[in-house]
Amino acid sequence: MRMNDKYIMERTAPEADSLLPGDILAGLTAARFGRAAEHHAEIGSTNTRARELAMDGAADGTLVIAEMQTAGRGRLTRTWQSPAGAGIYMSLIMRPRIDTERMALLTPAVALGVCRGLSAFCGDVRIKWPNDIVCAGRKLCGMLLEAHAGAGGLEWVVAGIGINAHQRIEDFEGEVQRTAGSIDIVTGGRCSRAAVVRAVLGEIERCVDMLTGGEVGRLMEEYARMSATLGKRVRVIAMDGEYEATAMALLEDGALLVRTDDGCERPVYAGDVSVRGLMGYA
Ligand code: BTN
């Protein structure tokens, strides 16, 4: 397992596991992301709050973070289990200067940043297309990106990020217990959630800046190296049926290009399908 000592040493006792803005700021390397932050002991959904702040003009990089959510939202109208003190529930407001045709690459850019940040703690962490971060076959993190565009193009994006930090398998409810993992399960220790937030914010900023700086080729290469999906056999679960295929590439419109067994290549879009690996969840 590849570990980064700088981060892994930052273990913490439960009483010291603060996510207060000042504790996140101490040691934050990101220049913009997380520099302004709003902390909540309890909230419905950090994404809902971040959307309100974005509408009110909050600056690029503003973070909303909570100890627990009572109405945590996941992709495809799912809920996100958000018990107090166990996970990291945060939403990052971004105002990237980016052409509309590159907008679809924001999700891969954020996913790559989160993946790189978490790999400093957990070693071999991968991106399961489109929005999941997995380690040892279990989901460590899910992301929900919501964007608003006006006449002049993209105005803001809220990247909602839920990271399982201290949960044990038995803490997950229902079906999720079969697929979810946490940083502490992987490392066998107790991570500092503030250190995780700092690592993830630093890497997201780097990856989003790569995208806005026009380094799309490099971004796609790094993404491919950390993908759990590309090159693998997958089951595509669509509204009108399921089929097996091989995941070939991430396209610049964010679609996953798959090749079916009869040789047809087709793009699949995250809003329309679920994609499962054939060897378990990832
Ligand atoms: C998914 O995997 O379905 C996406 C989960 C996203 C969860 C995070 S937790 C912080 C933010 N607030 C929400 O209500 N959802 C996102």
Image (spheres, rainbow, N blue to C red):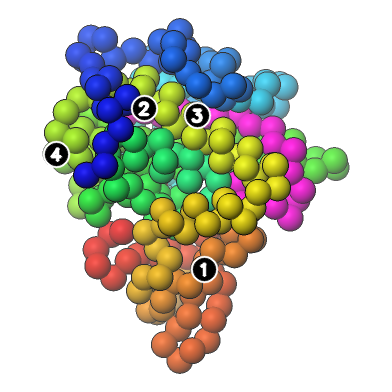
Q: Quadrant of residue 59?
A: top right
Report how far apart the C-alphas of labels 4 and 1 lie in the structure: 36 Å
Which residue matches tag 2?
196
Q: Is mark 2 within 8 Å of ligand 1?
A: no
Give the extent of the magenta segment.
Answer: 85-106
> Sequence order check: which comes first, mark 3 or mark 1?
3
Foreground disc of the pair 2, 3: 3
Which residue matches tag 3?
202
Which residue matches tag 1?
249
Q: Are marks 4 and 3 in contact (CB under 8 Å)?
A: no
- Which amino acid, by three-letter code, is at mark 2? Val
Report how far apart the C-alphas of labels 4 and 3 lie in the structure: 31 Å
Is residue 46 or residue 240 the one in the foreground?
Answer: 46
Circle 2 crowding by C-alpha within 10 Å: few under 14, some 14–19, many from 20? many
Foreground disc of the pair 4, 3: 3
In the image, taking residue 261 as reference, residue 59 lies left or right, namely right
> Sequence order check: which comes first, mark 4 or mark 1?
4
Callout 2 secondary element: helix
Foreground disc of the pair 4, 2: 2
List x then y, in percent, for residue 126. 36, 51
- Which amino acid, by three-letter code, is at mark 4? Glu
| Picture disc at residue 260 | none
- Which amino acid, by three-letter code, is at mark 1? Ala
> Sequence order check: which comes first, mark 1 or mark 2?
2
- Which amino acid, by three-letter code, is at mark 3? Gly
Report how far apart the C-alphas of labels 4 and 2 lie in the structure: 22 Å
